[in-house]
Amino acid sequence: MHFNLQVAGKTDIGSVRTNNEDNLGYDTRYGIFVVCDGMGGQAFGERASKIAVDSVLGFFRAGSNSRNTQIVGKIFDGVSGRANSLARAIQLANQSIFEESATDPSHTGMGSTIVAVCVEDDQFSIANVGDSRIYLIRAGTIQQLTHDHSLIMEQVRRGLMTMEEAEVSEMKNIIVRSVGVE
């Protein structure tokens, strides 16, 4: 089965911030789709999310020969080669943001969430870091496919807090993982 993909993307600054720290990108030739939400204040969050999107797209555009020689981070057992490529691309984004933040002490804390999908034939590989999400919408239902890496959701998973308590918590914006911070 082959999918006919139609893609559109839009970000919104929202009502709280003065600059948009979101970035997105895709390349249908390589079946890669990425959304990032930067953090770090001022232009640094915006820069981090742009580096992340560009790194992931660049990794897939470099071609399979180059990808096979770019050993970034670890390889995961029990997942497809395509899923490992996605993981390596995100680890490359992490490394790229971290290196950029190390060039200037004022960039400390620069990072981004990331959520990405790789599509090949009828197979989808998904990955996320932080609290950006992927949902499957099918037959009138919505199913969240990713798990948030946030302080609140960690507490819910450990049974320390209910979902009802999480929804009203003042700590719901604290994430425990992001790309580029470490």
Image (cartoon, helix red, strand yellow):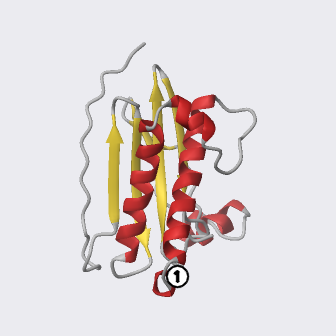
Residue 133 position in % (x across, y down): 47, 52
Judging depth in this view, the residue of 69 and 108 nearest the camera is: 69
* One can see residue 166 in this view: yes
**130 displayed left or right of 6:** right
Residue shown at the point (40%, 63%) measured from the top left: 49
Residue 164 position in % (x across, y down): 55, 67
Q: Is residue 33 above or below residue 45?
A: above
Residue shown at the point (64%, 29%) measured from the top left: 80
Residue shown at the point (53%, 40%) measured from the top left: 126
Quadrant containing the N terminus is top left
Residue 19 position in % (x across, y down): 26, 75
* One can see residue 130 in this view: no
Residue 99: quadrant of the picture: bottom right
Question: Mark 1 — residue?
Answer: 108
Q: Is residue 74 above or below residue 114?
A: above
Q: Amino acid at mark 1?
A: Thr
| Mark 1 burial class by Cα count in 10 Å: few <14, some 14-19, many 20+ | some
Disc 1 is placed on an element classified as loop
Residue located farthest toward the bottom when viewing the structure as drawn = 106
Q: Is residue 59 above or below residue 68?
A: below
**30 displayed left or right of 73:** left
Residue shown at the point (46%, 46%) measured from the top left: 116
Quadrant containing the C terminus is bottom right
Judging depth in this view, the residue of 109 and 102 nearest the camera is: 102
